[in-house]
Image: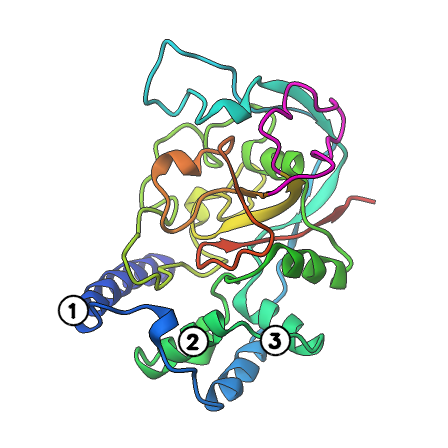
Amino acid sequence: MIGVVALSYYRVFTLCLAIWLLLVFPGFSWGELEPPPPMVDVHIANITSFTKASPSITIPKGWFLMGTNRRDDLRHTFETHYDDTEFPQRRIWVDGYEIDKYEVSLAEYLKFLLNTNRTVSQELRGLIWHLISVHFIPDQALAPWPALYVTWEEARDFCLHHKKRLPSEAEWEKAARGESARIFPWGEMDPTDDLAVFGQYHVHEIPLVATVDSFEDGQSIYKVLHLSGNIAEWVNDWLGSDYYPIMPEKNPPGPKMGRYKVVRGGSWKSKPVMLRSATRGGASPETRSATIGFRCVKPNL
């Protein structure tokens, strides 16, 4: 009952927040805001005091079906490929590993930045100050948000700092699909707002996200949360448009080089098709976005 009430509150809050922003700040953009005052650093430090590390989920070694077979007879269905980069569907072996049950939280990410003497980006500082000073969201409520405005390098370094690493694209997809090539982490059912956070786009880029430990109804067969929606996730691989036909059948590492790093899972802004477990996306490694976060893995020793 508590979870249902919390979910209902989240939906009402995000809707009211979006409407309020549209009415009060019609020309709002982060770039036009004054830099936040030094007081934001006090809140950032306090947010880190609520850090809770994610539990790990064991993904067993073995084969799974990765990608999608090309079909031109069906249009505009979730069963068909999103684009030409995800076929052919192949049987791929992945060694056992452990993956974070939750996306890395805002509190964990900020704690890492402070502990390693890294700068909190102006985008993130501005967002935190805005949410605290305008919307009166307490530090403790922001702590379990997913990390965002994270570059690929920061995500990689966070995982290494915790003796983990970013998942390979194959590891991420197996955690999302299981061995039976599920269309979505929860199965074949079309996305709904009970299963994932998506379709929340509005012009101001205020992230309408859920806490990393929420939406259990949308979990994967391995009980990993938010592999669809909420925040899209960096993985380790370079994005190769023609990699699937030639990738090794065991533990594919991705192309040796590229322009974009793979981003998986769709976000709070995404259309339903981007929530498919096989859909691939990419971004420049230097990208800081309100829609991209990450989670980590480690070998299953």
* 176 lies above or below 11: above
Q: Which residue is mark 2?
A: 126
First reached walking from the N terminus: tag 2 or tag 3: 3
Q: Nearer the viewer, residue 222 or 76?
A: 76
Q: Residue at x 32, y 68 (%)?
A: 29
Q: Residue furthest right?
A: 301
Dominant SS in magenta: loop
Q: Residue at x 62, y 54 (%)?
A: 152
Relative horizontal placement of residue 21, taking residue 231 as reference (left or right): left
Which label belongs to residue 23? 1
Residue 185: where, in percent of width, then height? 49, 36
Which label belongs to residue 184? none
Residue 201: where, in percent of width, then height? 30, 52
Q: Which residue is mark 3?
A: 119
Say what amino acid the circle numbered 3 marks: Thr
Q: Secondary structure at mark 2?
A: helix
The magenta-colored residue range is: 239-259
